[in-house]
Image (cartoon, rainbow, N blue to C red):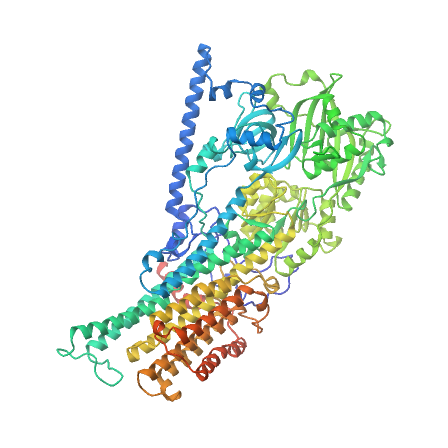
């Protein structure tokens, strides 16, 4: 079993301003794992990125004998392996077809022939193909409804058949197994199947949401975002780093465009695309560069569509909590079967030895005198008693509870702007001890505006006043802004205003360019792009080489201010004169620092002239060309304001109080990072801004491994970090036992998102590569939504624990009552039908009531749940033992002395009344104890109960149904009607569990889990054997 996370992550990391650890019932007290380093087979740490073989071993270790039946959404490992085989087969077929086609074309070129059909797409230039498709390569398709409808009718839509989910009747095997038994069984099955079916629909809706990717396309000369399903043949689609190729198509133009085709070919080889290799396959990801594609095939006509239509996307997934619960359920079931077998043996031995007597004292079995039919009837009665014990013992509600709470949480998290891609992330977020968050768009609003500009040694105030500098400066600025961008400027549909597209930083710079007089289309028409070096988060800059109307070649760079400034040897002053930068470098560095202290993102714009003869002519050499980035001339430094999100400071405080340390990891410079961190509450004051609390990525990267381990828990802010620095921080924190959640939006963030315990991708600014590597997508890019995910993660774990406490109380009480009664008197007070009703209460209805408890503020006032903490804590054991002992004591007293206490005759009617009272009191005990289970630690168990309509509705419905069963369904349940006085007695028996729970919570419990106490002798035995 994996040892990752063996150290208890429940304690807050050093440097966290969290309160002292609280002993909390919902997770149990903090546990010092070091004091007892034993290997718990139920301590499943994580299933993220686990292999099939690992999952098999976990199931075997946790006694998971029937996972696919117990858990409706547990991963079917055999089915998963079959799907992987089918994927490999389809991929190999597509490779064979492609190879055969290329071989055919090679032969045709030799003999000067060319056929039509698919060959045409390969041989015809993209310009000719665009004419056939009636597409303008610059402006895209017209985009009107009639044109789009015609294209869909002719070429199909960009959807593929998705195999339907499980049907209503296919969800529960009990429809076949139990359909002919009794109405009680049918009722249990109906409620369970209905609940399962609703959750199945919920999972299907979430999967549909995951597949509905929003992409940017060009239609009618405008950039607009549409659903991937709305892409049509002929569409012109810009591609940038991290984008998913939405359909099959051809490259129109590209700059250093590299595609990751592993999703189609199964090989992790990055393929470069250019006019010689222009084919783009749907489902692949853009690994680097930028380009524009023409869509030629959509939906089922693409290779990706063929692959997706041939397999069924399984919503099943293994989660650690599921594995542990399944193990517990199996273990309890084994105990139940063992006890039932023992009871049956005892009853049969008593019967055949003549020690069993009827109520009137007659011996039930006398050898040679008792008829076979009478003996058979008595034996069947004993078998029924044994089966009843098994029915009580097997906790079939556990799987339903985890399914319900996960589905309910996922649904509510969607409302809170979080789309769960992996079920296990719901659980793991409850254990998160640290969150490594991006700055831009997560802690800030991502609404960027240029609020300060510095040209030469002049601060332009206001920044949009373009008259303060020479026209030569304006001309170069306009050219650098318009050409060195991945954004676009266009008129709105009604032509009333100018719209800007691109990343927030690009949009801010373009809008500033427009304000200083730049005409985007005119400037771009005055020069020709020769080469593009797209911006990426590693080098933190992007550049272009272009040829102007005067045939002069210029290279423009734009990026992180201090990095671009370091490459400059001159600057252009406001009067248009060139000046050496060495003497004034201190002025520019101070300007950047001042902007940073005001939380401004600093971007520098620079250029240089270049000899056109030095530019590679050959296309292959041009592809390998490194755009010169030295000897630059500084044009301007701009400060971009991105205000903090409202409420983010409070969200950070909530995390801190909950023992979760928030770390900001950003590509901005240290001064900007420091200012934002103080504004967000990550740093208390400027005095905290010292190493290693605030550190540069480069410094952390250059540390030795031991130095990184020593300092990483102290880090609150990492500035000028690259994606590799973020990955290194995540790896180090996890190595030290932290449970790490990471936010990311770029393609280069994918390794960190993949490595983290919980990867959180941004839904608005996140690339498809980042989203594919994540576990949860934050739809509004808001840090407050991340905090809500933590609340829901803790709620999932707490709700499961509440249900376990409730169900084990019922199990223990019913098991002891029936076992004692069966052995002592040969009869059971609670018959099979009655226990099926109790099962319905505690399994299905109880699971539904407790699994839908919303998260409370109390959850965020305790330390994170340790990954190795026991599911059943000491306080839960205390609560359930107190309640079970009370129920056992009261009901056994009624069973053996009930006739005397109630002043009833010892006849059939008297025994029926007594047994009915036992049944009624037992059910009402569970109804009232359900309130206790809501708040396992708090004295006030009614807090917030009126706001949980599902809980109140289920409890009310259960109580009304119990009245109907007792008063009107006597023949069905073998009960009789009770008088008003006996109803009052039943209610008093049940309601006494409330004051008993309050008194019970005053009983102290040991810190060491009982599981450890009882396992120590076993561990010592194993250790001695090994030695």
Left or right of 597, for residue 233: left
Q: Is residue 272 visible?
A: no
Q: Nearer the viewer, residue 659 or 837?
A: 837
Left or right of 251, for residue 831: left
Left or right of 832, for residue 368: left
- Which percent across, then down, holds residue 405? 50, 58
Left or right of 634, for residue 822: left
- What quarter of the picture does the C terminus occupy? bottom left
Q: Nearer the viewer, residue 657 or 529?
A: 529
Residue at the top extreme of this rendering:
111
- Which percent across, then down, holds residue 50? 45, 47
Q: How many marks?
A: 0
Q: Residue at x 40, y 78 (%)?
A: 888
Q: Nearer the viewer, residue 38 or 627?
A: 627
Q: Is residue 751 visible?
A: yes
358 shown above or below 646: below
133 shown above or below 561: above
- Which percent across, then down, holds residue 775? 54, 47
- Which percent across, then down, holds residue 360? 25, 85
- Which quadrant holds residue 719? top right
526 shown above or below 410: above
- Which quadrant holds residue 387? bottom left
Residue at the left extreme of this rendering:
368
């Amino acid at each position: 079993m994996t040892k990752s996370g063996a150290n208890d992550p429940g304690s807050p990391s050093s440097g966290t301003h969290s309160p002292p650890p609280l002993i909390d019932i919902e997770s149990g007290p903090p546990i010092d794992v070091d004091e007892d380093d034993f290997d718990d087979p139920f301590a499943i740490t994580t299933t993220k990125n686990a292999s099939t073989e690992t999952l098999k071993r976990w199931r075997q270790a946790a006694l998971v004998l029937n996972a696919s039946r117990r858990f409706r959404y547990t991963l079917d490992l055999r089915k998963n392996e079959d799907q992987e085989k089918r994927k490999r087969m389809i991929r190999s077929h597509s490779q064979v077809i492609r190879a055969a086609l290329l071989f055919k074309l090679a032969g045709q070129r030799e003999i000067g022939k060319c056929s039509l059909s698919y060959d045409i797409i390969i041989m015809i230039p993209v310009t000719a193909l665009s004419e056939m498709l009636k597409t303008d390569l610059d402006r895209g398709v017209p985009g009107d409804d009639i044109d789009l409808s015609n294209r869909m009718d002719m070429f199909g839509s960009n959807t593929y058949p998705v195999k339907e989910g499980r049907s209503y009747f296919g969800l529960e095997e009990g429809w076949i197994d139990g359909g002919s038994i009794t109405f009680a069984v049918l009722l249990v099955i109906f409620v369970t199947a209905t609940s399962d079916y609703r959750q199945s629909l919920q999972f299907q809706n979430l999967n549909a949401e995951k597949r509905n990717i929003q992409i940017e396309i060009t239609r009618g000369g405008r950039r607009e975002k549409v659903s991937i399903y709305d892409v049509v043949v002929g569409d012109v689609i810009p591609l940038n780093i991290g984008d998913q190729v939405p359909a099959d198509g051809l490259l129109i133009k590209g700059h250093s465009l590299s595609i990751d085709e592993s999703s189609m070919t199964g090989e992790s080889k990055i393929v470069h695309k250019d006019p010689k290799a222009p084919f783009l396959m749907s489902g692949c990801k853009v690994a680097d560069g930028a380009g524009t594609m023409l869509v030629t095939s959509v939906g089922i006509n693409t290779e990706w569509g063929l692959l997706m239509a041939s397999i069924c996307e399984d919503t099943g997934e293994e989660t650690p909590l599921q594995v542990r619960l399944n193990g517990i359920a199996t273990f309890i079931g084994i105990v139940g079967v063992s006890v039932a077998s023992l009871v049956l043996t005892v009853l049969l031995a008593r019967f055949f030895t003549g020690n069993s007597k009827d109520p009137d004292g007659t011996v039930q079995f006398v050898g040679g005198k008792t008829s076979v039919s009478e003996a058979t009837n008595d034996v069947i009665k004993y078998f029924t008693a044994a089966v009843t014990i098994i029915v009580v013992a097997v906790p079939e509600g556990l799987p339903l509870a985890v399914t319900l709470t996960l589905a309910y949480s996922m649904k509510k998290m969607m409302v809170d702007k979080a789309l769960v891609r992996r079920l296990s992330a719901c659980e793991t977020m409850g254990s998160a001890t640290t969150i490594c968050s991006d700055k831009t768009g997560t802690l800030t609003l991502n609404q960027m505006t240029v609020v300060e500009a510095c040209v030469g040694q002049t601060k332009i105030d206001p920044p949009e006043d373009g008259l303060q500098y020479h026209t030569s400066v304006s001309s170069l600025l306009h050219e650098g802004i318009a050409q060195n961008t991945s954004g676009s400027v266009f008129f709105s549909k009604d032509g009333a205003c100018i719209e800007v597209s691109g990343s927030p930083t690009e949009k801010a710079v373009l809008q500033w360019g427009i304000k200083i007089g730049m005409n985007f289309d005119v400037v771009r028409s005055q020069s020709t792009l020769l080469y593009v070096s797209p911006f990426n988060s590693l080098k933190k800059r992007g550049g272009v080489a272009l040829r102007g109307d005067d045939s002069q070649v210029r290279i423009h760079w734009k990026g992180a201010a201090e990095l671009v400034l370091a490459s400059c040897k001159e600057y252009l002053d406001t009067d248009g004169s060139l000046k050496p930068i060495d003497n004034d470098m201190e002025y520019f560095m101070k300007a950047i620092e001042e902007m940073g202290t005001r939380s401004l993102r600093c971007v520098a714009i620079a250029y240089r002239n270049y000899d056109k003869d030095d530019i590679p002519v050959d296309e292959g050499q041009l592809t390998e060309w490194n755009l010169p980035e030295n000897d630059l001339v500084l044009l301007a430094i701009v400060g971009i304001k991105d205000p903090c999100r409202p409420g983010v400071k409070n969200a950070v405080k909530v995390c801190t109080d909950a023992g979760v340390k928030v770390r900001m990891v950003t590509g901005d410079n240290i001064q900007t990072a420091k200012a934002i961190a103080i504004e967000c509450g990550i740093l208390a004051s400027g005095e905290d801004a010292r190493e290693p609390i605030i550190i540069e990525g480069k410094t952390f990267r250059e540390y030795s491994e031991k130095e990184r381990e020593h300092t990483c828990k102290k880090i609150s802010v990492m500035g000028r970090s690259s994606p590799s620095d973020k990955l290194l921080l995540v790896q180090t924190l996890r190595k030290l036992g932290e449970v790490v959640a990471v936010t990311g939006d770029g393609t280069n963030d994918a390794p960190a998102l993949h490595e983290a315990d919980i990867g959180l991708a941004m839904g608005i600014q996140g690339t498809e590569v980042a989203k594919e590597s994540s576990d949860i997508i934050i739809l509004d890019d808001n840090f407050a939504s991340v905090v809500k995910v933590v609340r829901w993660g803790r709620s999932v774990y707490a709700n499961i624990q509440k249900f376990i406490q409730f169900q084990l109380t019922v199990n223990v009480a019913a098991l002891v009552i029936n076992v004692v009664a069966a052995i002592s008197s040969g009869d059971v007070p609670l018959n099979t039908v009655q226990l099926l009703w109790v099962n319905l209460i505690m399994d299905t209805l109880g699971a539904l009531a407790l699994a839908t408890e919303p998260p409370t503020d109390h959850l965020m006032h305790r330390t994170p749940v340790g990954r190795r903490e026991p599911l059943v804590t000491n306080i839960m054991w205390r609560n359930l033992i107190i309640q079970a002992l009370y129920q056992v004591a009261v009901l056994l007293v009624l069973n053996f002395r009930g006739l005397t206490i109630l002043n009833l005759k010892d006849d059939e009617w008297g025994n029926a009344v007594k047994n009915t009272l036992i049944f009624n009191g037992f059910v009402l005990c569970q109804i009232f104890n359900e309130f206790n289970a809501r708040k396992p630690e708090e004295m006030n168990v009614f807090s917030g109960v009126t706001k949980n309509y599902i809980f109140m509705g289920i409890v009310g419905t259960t109580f009304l149904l119990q009245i109907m069963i007792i008063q009107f369904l006597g023949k069905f349940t073998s009960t009789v009607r009770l008088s008003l006085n006996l109803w009052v007695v039943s209610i008093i028996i049940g309601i006494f569990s409330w004051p008993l729970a309050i008194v019970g919570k005053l009983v102290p419990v040991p810190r060491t889990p009982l599981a450890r106490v009882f396992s120590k002798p076993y561990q010592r035995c194993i250790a001695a054997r090994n030695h």
